[in-house]
Every structure is written in C-alpha cells, then in structure tokens.
Image (spheres, rainbow, N blue to C red):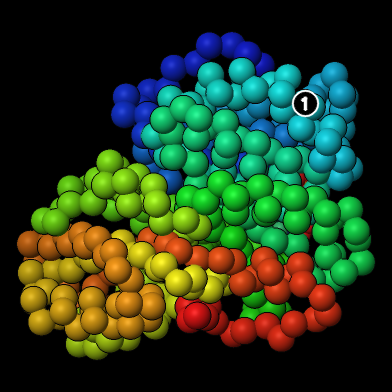
Amino acid sequence: MATTSGGEDWAPPNPSETFAVVGLGGAGSEAVHDLVRLGIPGVRAFAVNTDEKHLAKIEVDQRILLGKRQLAGRGSAGDRPAVLSAAEDGKEEMLRRLSKFEIVFLLAGLGGGTGSALLPFLARELRRGDALPVPVAFLPFQVELDTNSQRRENTTEAIDELEAMGGLILALANEKLRRFESLPMHHVFQLRNTYVHNLVTSLVDMVETPSLLNVDLASLKAHLDDAGVSTLLHAEYHISEPERLVPQALVESLLDFQLTEAPSALLHLDGGSNFTLRTHDRIVRSARHHFGEPRRLLLGIRMHPAPREVVRMTAVVGGLRSRAIRDALGSGQPERPAALRLSR
Ligand SMILES: Nc1nc2c(ncn2[C@@H]2O[C@H](COP(=O)(O)OP(=O)(O)OP(=O)(O)O)[C@@H](O)[C@H]2O)c(=O)[nH]1
Ligand SMILES: [Mg+2]
C-alpha cells in the first residue's frame, strides 16, 4: 500500500472519489487502521496525527503529519490550542487532499489534544466546501473525565463545537463498552471498530448501490440539511419478525442519543424477493413509534432477485441531542443504560 507523509501530488485510482475515512490522532488512526483491515472497498483511508512515530505504524493510503514546527512530531500531550495552530498551518494541505470527496468520515478519540482539535476543525472546513463530513467521536471513559480536567475540557469543547454545527454525528461512549468488560482491552476496541465498520459500510452501500426506492447522495444531504444533530443505526433481523428490526438496532447500538421535539428519520431497507408490502408496513410502523413519530420520514428500499431470510436496515435519525455526551459531562456518576434510549 502506498503511503506518503509529505505534500507530493497524489491521484487516487478510484475515479468516483466519493468516500474517505480519516483517522485523527492516536485513537482515531488506530480505528481507521482496523477499518482498513476489515475491508472498505471504494473508500480511501487517511491518517492525520501530530505524533510521527504513531503515524508511521498506521496502514492507510495517505498519512499527514501536522505541526512539525509547533510539536516536533512528538504529539501534543493534550495541548488542543497547539494542535489548532498546527491545523491552521496544515489546512490547505489537508483540504487539498480531502475536499474532493463527497462523504468524509472523521474518526477521533476525544480527550487528547490532536483528535479533539481536528475533529471539529476539519468538519467545519469540509462543510465550507461541498463535502459531507461525518464525525465519529469516541468519548473517553468516565474515570478519565472525572480525574483529568484537561481531558474533560478538550472533550467538552470538541463536542460543543460539533453539536453547534449539527449534521450526522456518531458519538460512541467508551462507557458503553463495559458490556464487554470481561474481554481483553484490545479486543473490546476491535469490537467497537467492527461496529463502526458496519455503520460506515452500510452508509456507503446505501448511497452507492441503486435501489428500487433510491436514497442517493443528494437526498441524503437534503434530508440532513435541516435535521439538526443526527445519527446512524444499522441492524438486520429475520423477516418473520419485522417489528424486532428497529429494537435490534437500538439494542446493538453503541451510540446514545435522546430525541428532541423535532425528530426525523431516513430509513433504508434491504430485502429479498419475498419482501412484501406488509413486511414493509410493519417495519415502518415500528420505526415511527421508536423514532418519536417523526414528521419527516424518507424511505429507501432495495430488493434482491432471490428470497432472503433477513431484512437489513440502515437508518439516519435526526433531531437528537446526545445523551451519552451530556451524561458523561454532567455531574456525578450517572447510571449507564444497557441500550440506546431513543425516547423523549
Ligand atoms: N489509544 C487508544 N485510545 C482510545 C481508543 N479508543 C478511545 N480512546 C480514547 O481516546 C482518547 C484520546 O487519546 P489519543 O487518541 O491517544 O489522543 P490524541 O488525539 O492522539 O491527542 P494527543 O496525543 O494528546 O495529541 C483517550 O481519552 C482514550 O480514552 C483506542 O482504540 N486506542
Ligand atoms: Mg496522540
């Protein structure tokens, strides 16, 4: 795999240049490394870091080292302002490489300096162009927030800036990984990255492969335009129990959001030739119920030529506020829900 860390010209072999995933800082880069290992066909992978040694270990199409002048390639040790200054210096270079893509997934662990600075910075800059940024934020463990004021401050600032921007945000709380607490740590992070991989590939598939009722990039962007903070859900379930599909997506989710008064939903269903109108109606009724009776519901349907045992759903739910974020940053030690609670 070709890797570079400088400013040389680069032409991706994929002529569509639609999707990119970008790891920001240590945790974000490791997550992208895992995504690449799991396979992301048609998606270009990048890593951006202020830590030269860490960056060199990450297997991606392109590596970008930031802040050589300010930080000497040694990482920021939590210094978000220093990374923001480095980001200004490297802005042109980053945008030259990234702004040609239509959807750019930005992955970062919040709390440190690099990921917390670059996630809102790049989301904002990419939005100024035509790209749709999709920030994927890993929230620190509660103990990190409770015992390290710099981590808390970096996380709060990054999240406040992201929420103010609206759009698609995938915020994954590390606390939710406690459901896997008997597994080795690296295995737990891999499980989380597999979950992110599912979300990324399901969104790519929804936009990229034409359907009977199509959700293309333009309709996705239009839907997101006034949806406020939105997130992504994905699940599959046996076709005999369509009402279980949405609850399954909620149970499996590592995201933790709360509906506001103005929910919206985009639902893309994927089934076989045995997918009937009745099955469709049962899923849509259940989705309306779980997603707070959204006034705006956009539907996409794809039918495969052969019968299928399972129905797959990808949903973009909007009009949210992040409960995980507020809980994590609130006072004391809130009780952790076992599953995503999409209720008012
Ligand atoms: N190393 C690592 N950290 C993770 C992972 N998932 C979440 N984190 C969290 O990511 C947060 C940020 O850590 P890093 O990514 O190392 O920080 P950074 O963005 O590189 O920032 P600086 O090193 O301070 O410049 C920490 O609070 C961890 O809780 C993971 O898979 N690996
Ligand atoms: Mg780092």
* Residue 75 in view in this figure: no
Q: Is residue 142 above or below residue 125?
A: below
Q: Tell me the element at label 1.
A: helix
**Residue 81, horizontal then vertical, whole percent:** 83, 36
Q: Is residue 310 left or right of residue 257?
A: left
Q: Which amino acid does label 1 sit on?
A: Ala
Q: Which of 82 and 160 is in front in this view?
A: 160
Q: Which residue is farthest top?
A: 8
Where residue 186 sits, quadrant-wise, is bottom right
Residue at position x 71%, y 24% in the image: 88
Residue at position x 87%, y 40% in the image: 79
What residue is pinned by disc 1?
86
Q: Nearer the viewer, residue 344 or 213?
A: 344
**Residue 33, horizontal then vertical, whole percent:** 59, 45
Q: Nearer the viewer, residue 163 or 302?
A: 163
Q: Does the residue labelled 1 lie within 8 Å of ligand 1?
A: no
**Residue 214, horizontal then vertical, whole percent:** 18, 52
Q: Is residue 147 above or below residue 23?
A: below
Q: Nearer the viewer, residue 263 or 197?
A: 263
Residue at position x 53%, y 78% in the image: 340
Q: In this view, does 272 lie to the left or right of 289?
A: left
**Residue 159, horizontal then vertical, whole percent:** 67, 54
Where residue 285 sits, quadrant-wise, is bottom left
Residue at position x 43%, y 25% in the image: 100
Q: Which residue is farthest front?
A: 261
Label count reads: 1
* Residue 212 in view in this figure: yes
Q: Is residue 237 left or right of residue 96?
A: left
Give the class, few, some or many, for how many residues have Cα within 10 Å of label 1's Cα (few <14, many ≥20): many
